[in-house]
Image: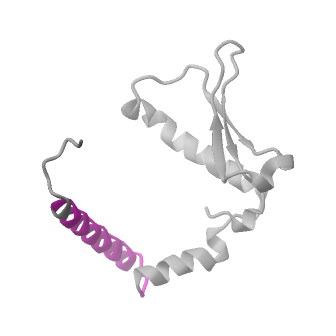
Amino acid sequence: MTTTFLTAPKIHEIGLAEVKTIHERMDKLLKSAGFVGTRQEYAQKLHREPEYFYTKREEIIQGYQKLAEKIEPNLSLLFEKIPQLGYKIEPVPEHSEKSNPAAYYVPGTISTQRPGIFFANTYQPEKRPK
């Protein structure tokens, strides 16, 4: 059971309208950025140009740290409770980096006062997008 009275075709219609709106916004942004081409061509550019990828392992950690500094002042706008233990950003241990995802989080523990740890995989930085 769902909480909507909309029919499946109506929901689909709404979704298509949203996709159209998003595509229009993307096209406007690409044009304002001076890009000449399609959305698909821009996506391909992002996937092949070295400037959009890291070159050193340390840059990945620094990128996440910079992002954390940017979002931390606004966390209270998104979350009612902010953990007091905080968190750290660390690289995935090298012995397991080949088999781990791009990033994952391990919650902190109150009993040991260990902060949460956000692990960022720094393996093959040249294949990790910024």
Residue 27 vs 6, above or below: the answer is: below
Q: In which quarter of the image is the N terminus?
A: top left
The main secondary structure of the magenta stretch is helix
Residue that protrudes farthest toward the right in the picture: 95
Residue that protrudes farthest toward the bottom in the picture: 37
Q: In this view, does 115 lie to the left or right of 5?
A: right
Q: State the residue in front, 105 or 10.
A: 10
Span highlighted in magenta in the image? 10-37
> Could you say where residue 122 lies in the image, as x and y percent from the top left?
75, 54
Q: Is residue 116 on the magenta stretch? A: no
> Could you say where residue 56 lies in the image, as x and y percent from the top left?
77, 60
Q: State the residue in front, 80 or 73.
A: 80
Residue that protrudes farthest toward the left in the picture: 5
Q: State the residue in front, 112 or 52.
A: 112
Q: Which residue is drawn at 59% across and 75% down?
A: 47
Q: For residue 25, what is the image quadrant?
A: bottom left
> Could you say where residue 62 lies in the image, as x and y percent from the top left?
68, 49
> Could you say where residue 79 lies in the image, as x and y percent from the top left?
41, 30
